[in-house]
């Protein structure tokens, strides 16, 4: 189809959509979508992260929000493209409160998918570009304070004489990325981090740890990695980057600070947050409280009969130090996902006799294949050369709602399975139990549904294929002084046992730091009700409680991998900024709590 015809088709749809919305004809607006069409909205219409599925849900949402949202000025921002009968277009729009960016897919003149996202609040735009701050006033006055003096005075007052509007508990990549967004929006924010330095949560992990995701996928907001940054960054390099990022973005970052507990003060409309900083107990009173503690809760450590009788060392993978001379040690790793493989490789490299106990099937994908087939069109030098920036890649990935994301991913992993057939045959021959997800949709869906059950192979699989790392299948029946006994009676001798057994839900942090009642009121974090293992239904359509309003007012959950922390931080930051400025934020479709912890 000619470019002009594609452009005409998109503009015809946008004009019809605008006419229906302006005329409050929600039925007509919904009927511009396919019968099972999908509209995914990030904040701009719903003040929520919400996917509407089908005509009824779309019209119901519009009936509720249109008078407040007042959408207008729908524009095509660049030339549409077409492939396999699907027209894709980048669009912009406005609401009464904001400016937005979106992505549209049309089939036969109807919308298959629509993504709408809030990008900035009117009247509260970031001071950037031509509106950047001057930095100094070119006047000479007695008593003028330098930038450093102003910064030091601000740091002395905030949290003591002046209260922050927001406190972020957790100073890893998620916490500092969100804090950078909030600083640009002039939202007074303190980040609480118990480690002594930003980046320590990476530095303290096992010696061989490196990112398994490529550099183009992992940028932080505003300040991208240099173009000579390694594709897969070692943990200490990431730790150094996070520490410098915190300083360069001028964040109010309280390292060496422990969160002792929090409770909401209804009368004051603020949180009472108790922290210990440098041995001093301090009470903060923010209006908004964000927990940015990663993608998981506390480590899952199984309680096996006889654990107290084991004479060797035993600890969770999160405590594995790595390195050191392991010659002659018999190591048993319980688990077979990312951490298990990384630790197995590290132990083997340092001389240990390693056995991996696989308790359930695992999805394995080779790093090179993941890069080529799953990520290459979005996050790579190839993608950049084709004009797909990181920001566009984030939007394109988000433009496929979870209802149809498996259908988009299954062909990718079928191709990977075919390309790497010999590799998978060798793993199976070694006794390794493989899967590609319950529906064959691969890595990303396993991650979104359960946050576990996979390994991106950066070499450890070959150790299993070659027998250099031993493999056993089964469940632990009990521990003895010398090792473990499996459910089939097999005895495994061990000097050290590492539990690579994952983590619990993030709201377990809330149970300890606020109360079990608040944790249950928020409900389980992560997963979207796919009905697959560890992600029970009913269908919810968006990740539970992430980056959006929870069932506890003024309490938010932020986290995920580097990509998610970057992309979704803008939407959470805008929700917080709107509340600080008194912009009305009527939330549409607040998720019900179906699962507690």
Image: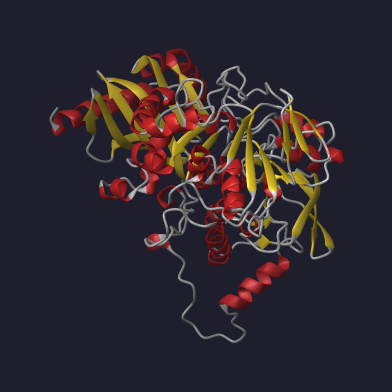
Asked whether 10 or 513 is in front, the reply is 513
Q: Can you see residue 241?
A: yes
Left or right: 390, with 581 as reference point: left
Where residue 507 sits in the image (x, y, percent)? 71, 36
Place of residue 406 in the rendered image (x, y in percent of width and height, measured from the top left): 43, 24
Q: Is residue 19 left or right of residue 563?
A: left
The vertical placement of 353 against 36, above or below, is below
Q: Position of residue 398 (x, y in %)?
A: 43, 34
Give residue 365's position: percent from left, percent from top.
Answer: 45, 36
In this rendering, would 433 be left or right of 157? left
Which image quadrant is residue 453 in?
A: top right
Above-or-below relation of 130 to 580: below
Task: Report the residue at 65% width, 61% height from top.
Answer: 253
Task: Choose top left, top right, bottom left or bottom right for residue 335.
Answer: top right
Whether residue 47 is visible:
no
Q: Is residue 14 above or below residue 169?
A: above
Which quarter of the figure is the N terminus placed in?
A: top left
């Amino acid at each position: 189809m000619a470019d002009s015809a594609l452009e005409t088709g998109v503009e015809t749809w946008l004009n019809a959509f605008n006419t229906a919305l302006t005329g409050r004809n929600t039925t007509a607006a919904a009927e511009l979508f396919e019968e099972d069409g999908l509209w995914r909205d990030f904040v701009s219409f719903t003040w929520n992260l919400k996917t509407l599925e089908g005509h009824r849900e779309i019209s119901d949402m519009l009936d509720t929000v249109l008078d407040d949202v007042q959408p207008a000025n729908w524009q095509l921002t660049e030339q549409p493209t077409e492939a396999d009968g699907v027209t894709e277009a980048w669009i912009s729009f406005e609401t009464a409160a904001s400016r937005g960016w979106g992505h549209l897919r049309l089939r036969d003149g109807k919308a298959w998918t629509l993504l709408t996202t809030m990008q900035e609040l009117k009247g509260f735009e970031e001071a950037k570009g031509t509106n950047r701050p001057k930095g100094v006033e070119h006047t000479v006055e007695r008593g003028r304070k330098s930038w450093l003096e102003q910064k030091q005075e601000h740091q002395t007052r905030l949290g003591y004489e002046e209260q922050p509007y927001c406190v972020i508990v957790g100073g890893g990549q998620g916490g500092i990325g969100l804090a950078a967004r909030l600083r640009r929006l002039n939202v007074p924010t303190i980040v609480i981090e118990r480690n002594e330095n930003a980046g320590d949560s990476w530095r303290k992990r096992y010696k061989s740890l490196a990112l398994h995701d490529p550099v183009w996928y992992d940028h932080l907001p505003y300040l991208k990695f240099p173009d000579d940054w390694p594709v897969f960054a070692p943990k200490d390099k990431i730790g150094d980057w996070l520490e410098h990022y915190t300083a360069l973005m001028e964040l109010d970052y309280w390292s060496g600070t422990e969160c002792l507990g929090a409770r909401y003060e209804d009368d004051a409309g603020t949180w009472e947050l108790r922290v210990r900083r440098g041995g001093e107990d301090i009470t903060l009173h923010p209006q908004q409280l964000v927990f940015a503690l990663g993608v998981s809760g506390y480590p899952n450590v199984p309680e096996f009969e006889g654990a107290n009788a084991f004479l060797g060392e035993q600890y969770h993978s999160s405590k594995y130090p790595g390195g050191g001379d392991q010659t002659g040690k018999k190591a048993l790793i319980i688990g077979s996902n990312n951490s298990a493989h990384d630790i197995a490789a590290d132990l083997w490299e340092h001389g240990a006799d390693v056995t991996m106990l696989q308790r359930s099937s695992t999805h394995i994908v080779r790093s090179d294949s993941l890069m080529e087939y799953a990520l290459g069109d979005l996050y790579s030098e190839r993608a950049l050369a084709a004009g797909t920036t990181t920001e566009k890649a984030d939007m394109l990935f988000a433009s496929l709602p979870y209802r149809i994301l498996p259908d988009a991913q299954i062909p990718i992993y079928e191709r990977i399975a075919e390309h790497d057939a010999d590799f998978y045959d060798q793993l199976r021959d070694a006794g390794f139990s493989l899967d590609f997800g319950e529906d064959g949709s691969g890595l990303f869906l396993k991650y979104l549904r359960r946050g576990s059950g996979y390994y991106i192979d950066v070499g450890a699989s070959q150790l299993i294929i070659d027998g250099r790392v031993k493999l056993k299948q089964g469940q632990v029946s009990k521990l003895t002084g010398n090792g473990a006994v499996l459910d089939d009676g097999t005895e495994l001798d061990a000097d050290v046992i590492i539990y690579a057994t994952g983590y619990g839900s993030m709201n377990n942090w809330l149970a300890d730091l606020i109360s079990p009642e608040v944790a249950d009121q928020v409900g389980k974090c992560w997963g979207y009700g796919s009905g697959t293992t560890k992600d029970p239904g009913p269908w919810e359509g968006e990740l539970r409680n992430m980056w959006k309003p929870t069932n506890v007012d003024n309490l938010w959950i932020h986290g995920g991998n580097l990509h998610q922390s970057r992309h979704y931080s803008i939407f959470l930051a805008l929700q917080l900024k709107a509340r600080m400025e008194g912009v009305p934020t009527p939330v549409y479709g607040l998720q019900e709590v179906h699962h507690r912890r």
